[in-house]
Every structure is written in C-alpha cells, then in structure tokens.
Image (cartoon, helix red, strand yellow):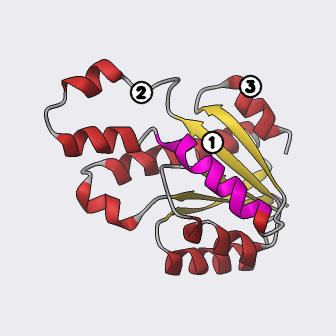
Amino acid sequence: MKIKIGLYGIGLDTYWNQFDGLLDRLQGWQQTIADKIIEDHPDVEVVNTGIVDNPTKAREVGQILAQSNIELILLYVSTYALSSTVLPVVQRARVPVIVLNLQATNAIDYDKLNQMSDRGKMTGEWLSYCQACSAPEIASVFNRANIPYHMVTGTLKDPDAWKEISQW
C-alpha cells in the first residue's frame, strides 16, 4: 500500500488574467515537484490538487485532502498568496505540513527582466520568483493558529532541499 501525501500550490486568482503564462509556469513547477517525489519514492502516491488561489477553493481542497486520507501535506509556495488560501486547507486536512519555499532557479534573471518593456510581463516574471515573499506570512499564520510545520528553502534542483524533503 502506498503512502499518500497531498501537494498544493498557492497564488491569487486575480493574477492569472493579468500576467499571461504565470499560472501555466507555476503549475509546471508544481508538477516537477510531484514528479520528483514519485521518482524518488515509488512507494508514495501524490494527491496533487493544483494551485489554490481563493478561499473557496482552499476549503474545497482541504476537504479533498482530508477525504483522501493523506499522511502529510506539501504546501508549495508557488508565488505570493494570502493566508486565506493557505490556512483552510491545512485546518481541514489535519496532518503535518511541509512548506516548500522553492524557487525555480537560484535567482531571477535581472538582465532579462530589465530588458522587458512591458511592465505587466516584468511583474509576472517577478511573481514567478516570489516564493520567499509569502514564507513569513505563512509561518506567522501557522504560528498564530498553533499549526506545526517545517519549512524547506532552496530551489527546484537543490539536492540539499530534496534531501530534507525526503527525510519526511
């Protein structure tokens, strides 16, 4: 029997129409996480619920994960999001939480960013590297709600981060 873990990302639904390609990019990185977990741990089933981007979806995903009998949640900090998209999921699922503060690469390509003439594209690019922006708010809301969590910081290809994730 496989161990079940939940995986969800976070964002704001207002971003998707404003920043072309941002949602697809973030979903792709989240799928990279799911694939890596399955590759490294064939005894694990990942319940990947996609990106939670509003409070209603947060409640729905929390219910889905609770009913899926998962043993752990991996919360992928995809981009900036409000705590109202984070807390309801975890409260409903009632399992340990690992916060994945993982950027795609070590740093945003500022040369590329500064050459963009479209401010919307610049903001979308910045938001795709905004994982660390939400990490303090997530930690604060979990602390206030007395929800234990562990945060892993690194990049999607960081062996040290994946080693830490694998220990869970």
The residue located at (53%, 23%) in the rendering is 106
Left or right, 109 with reference to 66: left
Instruction: Name the residue tied to disc 2.
Output: 108
Q: CA distance from mark 3 to mark 1?
A: 13 Å
Vertical position of residue 26 compared to residue 117: above or below: below
- x%, y% of residue 131? 53, 43
Instruction: Name the N-terminal-most of marks 1 and 2.
Output: 1
Which residues are drawn in magenta? 130-143
Vertical position of residue 151 compared to residue 93: above or below: above
Circle 3 sits in a helix, a strand or a loop, which is it? helix
Circle 1 sits in a helix, a strand or a loop, which is it? strand
- Local crowd at mark 2 within 10 Å, few (<14), some, or many (≥20)? some
97 or 144, which lies in front? Answer: 144
6 or 90, which lies in front? Answer: 90
The residue located at (86%, 39%) in the rendering is 167
Is residue 162 found inside the magenta-colored segment of the image? no
- x%, y% of residue 138? 65, 56
The residue located at (60%, 43%) in the rendering is 33
Instruction: Name the residue tied to disc 3.
Output: 160
Is residue 131 found inside the magenta-colored segment of the image? yes
Looking at the image, can residue 68 be seen?
no
**Label 2 near label 1: C-beta < 8 Å?**
no
Q: Amino acid at mark 1?
A: Asn
Instruction: Name the N-terminal-most of marks 2 and 3.
Output: 2
Q: Amino acid at mark 3?
A: Asp
- Local crowd at mark 1 within 10 Å, few (<14), some, or many (≥20)? many
Instruction: Name the residue tied to disc 1.
Output: 101
| Quarter of the image that includes the C terminus | top right
Left or right, 77 with reference to 112: right
Q: CA distance from mark 1 to mark 2?
A: 15 Å
- x%, y% of residue 68? 72, 74
Circle 2 sits in a helix, a strand or a loop, which is it? loop
